[in-house]
Structures are given as structure tokens and as C-alpha cells.
Image (spheres, rainbow, N blue to C red):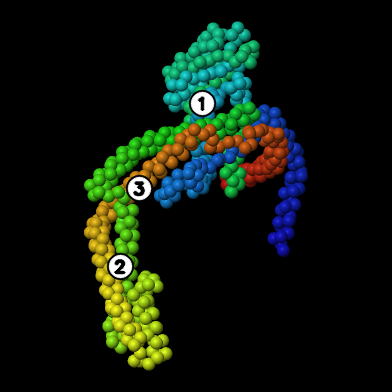
Amino acid sequence: MEMKDKEEISLKKIIIAGVRRWKVFVLAGCISLIPAILYLLIYPKTYEVRTIIKFQEDKDLGSGGSMGLGDAAGLMRSFGIVGKGGGSVNMEDEIAVLRSNKLFRKVVLDLGLDVSYEKPFSMVKLYDDDSPVKVVPDSVMRETLDDVIAFSLKIDKNGAVKIKMKEDGKKYSFSALPADLALEKGNVRIFSQEVCSGVRPVSLDITISPAGWVAEDLIEVVGMDEFSKNANSLEMVYQDHNRLRGKKLLETLVDQYNKFTESVKQEEGRKSMAFLEGRINDVISQLQLKEREIEKYKLANNITDVQYDVQFYAEAIKTYREKIIELEAQSHMIELLSDYLSDPENKYNVVPSLLSAGEGEGGPVALYNEALMVREKMIKSSSSINPLSEVADSQLDKLRNGVFVSIENARKSIRFVTDDLKSREKEILDKIGNVPVYEREYVDLKRQQEILQGVYLVLLQKKEEIALSLGSERVRGFLTEPAYVASKPVAPRKLFAAIFMVLFTMVVPVVCLYGKKQLKDLIEEYKKSEY
């Protein structure tokens, strides 16, 4: 409880001490007003420039087999040569390209940002179009410059030019512009701007910097952020006190990016086309040799097309074997019929119509069966010693002999046809005895030819895709939102000036008073230590 009272008493003492010294706080506030006003008046107005760039995907023209090459598209997909529905954009890679020193260096040289113009005692760097004079280093200096070149330039009312180098103090004089300044690291062309030709006298501090150094500074201040995680768009932000320079910088950056990606695409396309041309010519030569080899093989083995020849032979053998089986079945049935008739018990039985199907109604078997039916009717209608019955038996014996003769003729006919079919089957089998070897060798040659044809179609399709890609005017990135300047400047900010005044007014007096007290205590301690 006592400690709490002591803290409250100490806080009250501090507040009371501050109130008693209110003049110190008022003085600090008045002093802080001076740098705040100077900040608002002297610091150049800085504007924020924004733009949005969208990256287009690199889609393969043959990704869906749309080139109409049939199996070639499927073959390409199986080998992984054709893209699957287009190439996706890797935002990190694109940002890395945009942030490359090489790309920014081209922007610097294109806009002439490697040369800065500044009026004496000024915080504003003039843009190329705002300067009364223009300084253009030659290409050799721009490529090889490795240090800063600074000089002051003065033009009097009469147009006389005086230049003083800041590094070694050398002086150069010219009667009028344009003028060529010869330096150790290269030549510099100086001429007056038409829009500012009447502005005299002129006094400028000019600095020529290596383009790579300026590019490094720009890389740090140009902000790049993905528009959204699922979009192929990038938002770029840049702050500059010259609105025109800010807009041109972002637009030139995108333009140089497109030129760079297009040059890379063209270079890769030319190399790919040269490679494909060589491969296509080589494949055509191999394909012609393989076709000649197949032609010689066919002539040497007296074949037309092994596949069709084998198919023809197989169908012929199948047909012959079906007929042979059919004839052997008939021969077996004839043997059964012969055995049936040879049995004495079946002498007066009806003969099965095994051969009657091919004989018609007047065949021996049909006549024999009719005679049996007549004899059976006669026996039922009269006695067995009837003279007509003896005549019928005699006639029946003759017909029976005719049936035996018919069976023998059918047996000989079937045997003759069967032997003929078997001989033909043997001839075909003799012809195709070496067909498996021919087929294997021919299929191997044909497979090599088809592989070469597939490779030729793949290479031809890829060549067409690259040719179409090289001929297209499709840029990699385009501005969906042209570079624009925000309506309100981002600097100087009144809020920053107010915060500075508050902090200066509150902190500086407290630090001074506390420091004064500590210094007083230190002096007293020092005096006590002397006694």
C-alpha cells in the first residue's frame, strides 16, 4: 500500500514538474513546427503509379490433337511431347524475370534514367523532358561505365557553356550547344531541349551513373504483388515525384518484358526448327531405305503382302478341311448303310434314306424301298405261294443289287473327291511351310517402317506448331489496367508532420529535463566526492 502511494506521489510530481515547465513544451512545439513546415514545403510531391499486368499461358497448339494427324497426336501425348491442356503460369518465375537487373537495365537505357539532372540546392531530380539540356552518353560509355561521372553545367545568357568535373575539377568550355564532351570513359553529347531553349541562365548538377546501379535502385522501389492467388495477374506499384516518368517506367518495363520473352521464344523456336528440320530429313532418308528394303524382301520371297497371303491360305485350308470332314462323315454313313444291307436279316427291311437325299425320287434306294412296300402289300392280300410274289422277289433282288452298286459308286466318288481335297490341302501347306519365318521377318520390317512413320508425323506436327507459334503476335503479358497515377500524393503527408510534432513536443522536453536533472545529480555527487 505504501509502495502504491509512493508511485502515485512520484507520478504526481512528474506531472506537476511538467506543468511548471510548460514553457519548455511550448518552445519544443514551436521548434518542431519549423522542420514540419519545411518538410511540407520543400519535400517534392510524390505520386503513386499503379498498373496490372496479366500473363497469358503458353498453350500447345496440338494439345488436343486438333492438328488432325490422328495417331501422331496420341503418340506425342504418350511420349509426353504434347502439353496437357496448356502450360500454366508460374508467378514466381515471371516476377523473377521482371525483377532481373538485365530487364531494368534496358528500361533505364531506354528512358535515359542513367543520367540525372538536379538544380543546385534542390531535392527534385528533373526528368529528361523537364531539363533545359539533354546529356546523351555514347553506347560504349553506357556499356562499359563502372563508376559515377558527375559534373556541374552552367549556361550564361549568351549561351556559353561551362562544365566543371566534380571528381578531378577539370573544366571545359563551349561557345554554344550542342557540344561533345570527350572524357576518358567515352564521349558525351550535350544539346539543348527545344521546349526549354529560351530558359537562361541555366545551372545544373548532372550525374551519369552505370545503368546497372540505377537498375538496382529501381528494383528496390518498384513493388510487385500477385493480384490474387488464383489469378495470373500481377499488380505493380511505383512512387515518383514525376508522374509522367512513373507511368513511362511501368509501361516500358512491361514492354521490355514482352520483348525479352518474345526474343527468348524466337530464339528457342529457331533452334527447335533447325533441329526438327535436320531430324525430319534424317527420318525421311531412313524411311526411304526401309521402304526399299521391304520391296526387295517381297521380290526375293515372291510375296505380295504376308498378312493377306496368310489370311487367304488360312481361309482355303479351312474350307478344304470342312469339305473333307463332310465327305468323311458321308463315307462313314455309306459304310453303315452297306453293313445294314449286307445283313441277311435286313433283306426285306426298308433301307434308311441315308443316300436318298441326293438321289431324288428315282434313286436305287427309293425304288428298292417302293418295291418292298409293294411286296409287303401283296403278301398281306394273298398267300405266300402266289406267282406274283415270286416275280416281286426276283425284281426286289435286282433292285437290291442296284443299291449295292449305287453304294459302291458313292464310296468311290467320295474317296476320289476326298483325295483331291487332301492333295490341294497338302499343296497349300507346302506353300505356307515357311510363312511363319516370312511373317516374322516381314512384321519386323513393317514395325520399323511404322515407327519411322510415327516419328515423322510427330516431328512434322511439332514443326507446324512452332511455325504457328513464331508467326503469332501473342504477347506474354499485357496491361489489363494501363498505368495510372493515384489522385492523392503519397508524400509529403500532413499526418507524418503532425506525428513528428507531437513526438518532438512530448519526448524532447522530457529527455532534456531528465537529462538536466541527472546532470545536476552527477555534479552534486562529484562535488561530494571531493570532500
Q: Which mark is residue 450?
A: 3
Please determine whether, in this image, residue 476 is positioned above or below residue 370.
Answer: above
Q: Amino acid at mark 1?
A: Leu
Q: Which residue is mark 1?
A: 109
Residue 524: horizontal and vertical position, in percent? 63, 45
| Quadrant (top left, top right, bottom left, bottom right) of the N terminus | bottom right
- Which label sits in the foreground, 1 or 3? 3
Which element carries disc 2, helix, strand or loop?
Answer: helix
Q: Amino acid at mark 2?
A: Ile
Q: CA distance from mark 3 to mark 2?
A: 41 Å
Q: Which mark is residue 220?
A: none
Q: Residue at x 70, y 28 (%)?
A: 41
Residue 58: horizontal and vertical position, in percent? 51, 41
Relative to 462, is 229 on the left or the right? right
Q: Amino acid at mark 3?
A: Glu
Please determine whether, in this image, residue 137 is positioned above or below residue 84.
Answer: above
Q: Residue at x 37, y 76 (%)?
A: 366
User: Which one is nearer the viewer's eye here, 291 or 269?
Assistant: 291
Q: Which residue is mark 2?
A: 324
- Which label sits in the foreground, 1 or 2? 2
